[in-house]
Amino acid sequence: MSKAVKNYKAGEGMKVNIAGLQMKNPVITASGTFGYGEEYADYIDLNLLGGISVKGLSLAPRAGNPPPRIMETTGGMLNSVGLQNIGVDAFIEEKIPFLRKFDVAVIANIYGESYADYAAVAAKLDGVPGVHALEVNISCPNVQKGGLSFGADPRAAAEVTRRVRAKNSLPLIVKLTPNVTDITVIARAVEQAGADAVSLINTLTGMSIDLDTREPHLKSITGGLSGPAIKPVALRMVWQVARQVKIPVIGMGGIMTARDALEFMVAGASAVQVGTASFVNPRSGVEIIDGMQGYMKKNRIKKITDIVGTLKT
Amino acid sequence: MKDICLGLVTANEEIKRNYFLMKVALPDGFTDPLPGQFVMMRIAGLQDPFLSRPLSIYAFSRSQKGCMIELLYRVAGRGTGIMAGLIAGSEVEVIGPLGQSYVVDPRRENIVFIAGGIGVAPLSLLAGHLGETVCREASSMTFFLGARTAEEIVGLELLHKYCYRVIVCTDDGSMGEKGQVISVFKKEMAKFPSAETALYACGPRPMLKALAIMVGGKYMCQVSLEERMACGVGACAGCVVAIKEQAGAMAYRRVCADGPVFDLEKVIWQ
């Protein structure tokens, strides 16, 4: 009766290298959906994942937004968690020792409310054993003072990238917001400012209303939409960005299955992130890896990198 | 490694209008739940509703054939509405048992339960646990069960088995005493010396808030809270509640992982 637990060990052909970040496969669990790894360690073997992007870290601990914070929507969900986190110091002290027990790429997702904040968090993570890359959140739509303004303005996005680059030598991924007119402009700006890779998309700003009370379902009124509902938008943006930048693109947005993940790679992504799917099924990440390998075998694809950017138009 | 269990619905009966009792057969590997714990459940293979639903565990049994959880739930929205349509033989995916359980202090002679409506579910499991596992005399346990009308009083059969006294009350007087469960408890409060009594409560937020105002600080009281959840395992921080920390500070704690059981006096009612 129990669901079969298969041996999901990734083959050689699944290896990827994203701007110096070596991973045994291209599947990363997305920031904000996988805690600090330990929350899911009872449900899946973290060693099987390509990478884990941890919950966004700020300089000081952050309480987050008042509840209610989430609402289910058609084919997805809205959240306004507000970047609740334990702060970068507690992360290094309390969470890294646990993550170091696993053979998995640990990506520290960071954010700030000022250029100085970003630089300070990046500096604290420089040279910390067990952290393999940085992912800079310039895009979270929940925090009014932060996220949106940096990620929606190419000059601000570039400045954040430069400040972080100056303080940290790890592979630097900049995570982009879809809540802009032309995402390729921001992607090019951070590439020129020294980003090693870009990841996209973060959540799309949305809202949901309770008709009977005429109140928003979220206390913060608006929140970030994620889940399969956003996949077509994400796929389109990954395709657009991959054609405009030379650095690797990490694709995400509504990936639920191996086929979804492979579609992102065909559109030009060198790796993918699995987010909201983990809420629905904690084993999504490893099941996607397994499914990708099955697809490769069936279609005689030797290396996963061979599929990247092979969209026929 | 914890399993994501595939469960088989063996019964899903509407016991009162909008109130259902679902029985789910689970594999042996399912851990015995502690009172107050819950499961995340979804219909196997279905992506709509998108998220799993948190459901209190109402009863649990283990036999040679395997184990069985019983879920007593109210149809509150779209997710539970679809769940209500499940027939025997349907498959569900179950993660659990999850969350922190009620803490039982053996020195407390009197146990008082205060439930509003569907809040009876986790408290019934606790009463059964105290009777069967901890060998509490039924005479030491008093259960106050309230709802708006007789049509919303569920779970009485088991309570009569576990507790010596079950006091039923309804807002409209259609069953038991007339009045809200908190006021009915208030009338009897003097019978339960605070130093010897433990209170356990579950129900709608306004009821729990009224209880907090009435007994706050006077009684040892634990409550279990309900909140919309996405992951159920502490990863998303979507289901938080404001909790008083030491030195008057406030923090958002996750109902799924830090709760759903909290000390009543620590909950900040907003």
Image (cartoon, coloured by chain):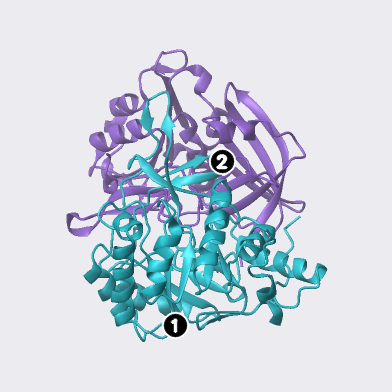
**Could you say which quadrant of the image residue A4 lies in?**
bottom right
**In this structure image, what is the colour of chain B?**
purple
Q: Colour of chain A?
A: cyan
Identify the image quadrant of the C terminus of chain A: bottom right
Q: Amino acid at mark 1?
A: Gly
Question: The disc labelled 2 sits on which kind of residue?
Answer: Tyr
Q: Quadrant of residue A91?
A: bottom left
For image coordinates 61% across by 58% down, the residue present is B31
Q: Is residue B230 left or right of residue A194?
A: right
The image shows residue B112 at horizontal and vertical percentages of 39, 38
Reading the image, the residue beneath label 1 is A130
Give coordinates of residue A66: x percent, y percent: 31, 46
Q: Chain for mark 1?
A: A
> The numbered mark 2 sits on a residue in which chain?
B
Identify the residue under disc 2: B58
Q: Is residue A48 left or right of residue B177?
A: right
Q: Would you say residue A233 is visible in this rendering?
A: yes
